[in-house]
Image: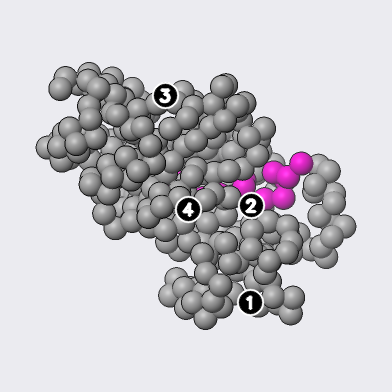
Amino acid sequence: MNETVKKLTLPMTVQLDDMSPEEFITYYKSNQSEIERDLHEVGAVKFQGIQIESMEVFQHIVNSIANKFLAYIDGNSPRTKLSGNVYTSTEYDKTQRITMHNELSYSAKWPAKLFFSCIQPSDTGGETLLADSREILNHMDKALVDEIERKGVIYIRNLHGGRGIGPSWQDTFETESKEQLEAYCEQYDIEHQWKEDGSLRLIQRSKGIIAHRGSGARVWFNQIDQFHPSHLDSEIYEMMQHMYDSTEDFPMFVKFGDGTQITEAMVREILDTTEKLTIAPPWEINELLIVDNELASHGRNSFTGERRVLVSMTE
């Protein structure tokens, strides 16, 4: 069982010698301390040459090398829970590119690690994009960084109760129980307001820039651009302006923690800076990608054909 390691900036790639699932589990456990060290240094490690031929095999591997799994509760990306701890990667329109983000960075509870594997690569595109969150922070406009650190960020989401634009609160929290949802919100200090039509407004406060839980390194950790109205197609934005009294009634909205507005120019700075640091490693079958969710942001390229990428998340 030979291995070849490429010390790339992101991700670090480990080429294995066509390992069975059980061989990889043994290998991982024997080298776990070194793998954790590399993950904290680089932010993402990709293993190539593991026999991952199905969702069941992926789940077996991840269940064997990780614990404290996190359900996709409070998520804002369309995906399907397949079995146990395994979800599909985002099911967002394949013609669209998903911009860079750290998973659930708007929420009070986010995963520490993400485990990805591609069961079916797309015909073209479809890469899981990666960028170093430390480098994003280092290259971001200093005035914007200072403003975020002073004010923090407020995310607003308006979730319908079964009919409407965007996700429902039932799908978002994987429950039909208002009481269970309210208990979750109270546990994690999420402000929530029920509306007469059965929809729900969530107000979540975030720092936007945090210290990595392991190293203490400062990292860019937010989804400002994805929540800002400027990310919408112009026709959709115009339609929603007619539908809603205020941008704060849109399915998603973001502003500074003191209530002041985040401008389109700021969002453009975020997108431009992140784009310069983004890489697009192609997917092949029989790969396992482990991402430190605080050290590395991720996204998805548009694609053609069918694509099936699986993901599990751990605390």
The answer to which of marks 1 and 4 sits earlier in the sequence is 4
Measured in 3D between alpha carbons, the distance from the residue under mark 2 to the one under mark 4, in whole angstroms, is 24 Å
Measured in 3D between alpha carbons, the distance from the residue under mark 2 to the one under mark 3, in whole angstroms, is 31 Å
Q: Mark 1 points at which residue?
A: 193
For the residue labelled by badge 3, is the local secondary structure a helix, a strand or a loop? loop
Q: Is residue 14 left or right of residue 271?
A: left
- Residue 284's tag is 3
| 144 versus 198 height, above or below | above
Q: Which amino acid does label 1 sit on?
A: Gln
For the residue labelled by badge 1, is the local secondary structure a helix, a strand or a loop? strand
Residue in the foreground of this view, choosing between 136 and 237: 237
Q: What residue type is labelled 3?
A: Glu
Residue located at (35% from left, 27% from top):
286
Q: Kindly tell me whether residue 282 is visible in this rendering.
A: yes
Few, some or many residues within 10 Å of mark 1 (<14, 14–19, 20+): few
- Residue 227's tag is 2
Few, some or many residues within 10 Å of mark 2 (<14, 14–19, 20+): many
Residue located at (74% from left, 79% from top):
196
In this rendering, the label closer to the viewer, 1 or 4: 4
Residue located at (60% from left, 66% from top):
169
Q: Mark 4 points at which residue?
A: 81
In this rendering, the label closer to the viewer, 3 or 4: 4
